[in-house]
Image (tube, rainbow, N blue to C red):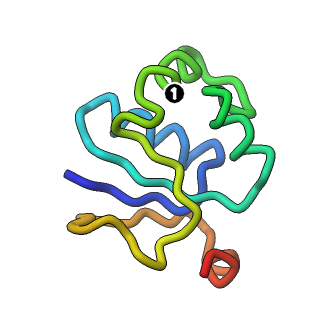
Amino acid sequence: MKIGIVGLGYVGLTLAIVAAARGAEVFGTEINPQIKAGLAENRATFFEPKLDELIAKHNHKNFHCINNFNAPPLSIKCIYNYGWNAALSKLN
């Protein structure tokens, strides 16, 4: 299953990585440059036990941080949006 997640803060990133660890292919998007930089280094910008280890295991394999959903990967089954309605326009 392919899942899209808008916002990779505490809720979105934790959900994304757990879904990837359970076998889903996950595409997440984020506008905060600090969060994006952390993911490029396989780390979260907050503490959650074992999260950095799971990011390193799944990043660029079945977890992908993408710039936007203008052209989402084919056959995404759901997109999760946690309180990001105002930010969605910035992603396009």
Side of 70 where 75 appears, left or right: left
Side of 35 where 57 appears, left or right: left
**For residue 23, what is the image quadrant?**
top left
Q: Total marks drawn?
A: 1
Instruction: Identify residue type, mark 1.
Output: Ile
Residue 6, above or below 63: below
Q: Which residue is drawn at 64% across and 58% down?
A: 30
The residue where tag 1 is placed is 55
Residue 42: give x, y in percent of width and height. 61, 27
Residue 52: give x, y in percent of width and height. 58, 21
Label 1 Cα crowd, 10 Å radius (few <14 / some 14-19 / many 20+): many
Furthest-right residue in this view: 34
**For residue 63, what is the image quadrant?**
top left
Q: Residue at x 65, y 47 (%)?
A: 9
Residue 15, above or below 72: above
Quadrant that contains the C terminus? bottom right
The secondary structure type at the circle numbered 1 is helix
Side of 77 where 61 appears, left or right: right
**For residue 62, what is the image quadrant?**
top left
Residue 75, above or below 54: below
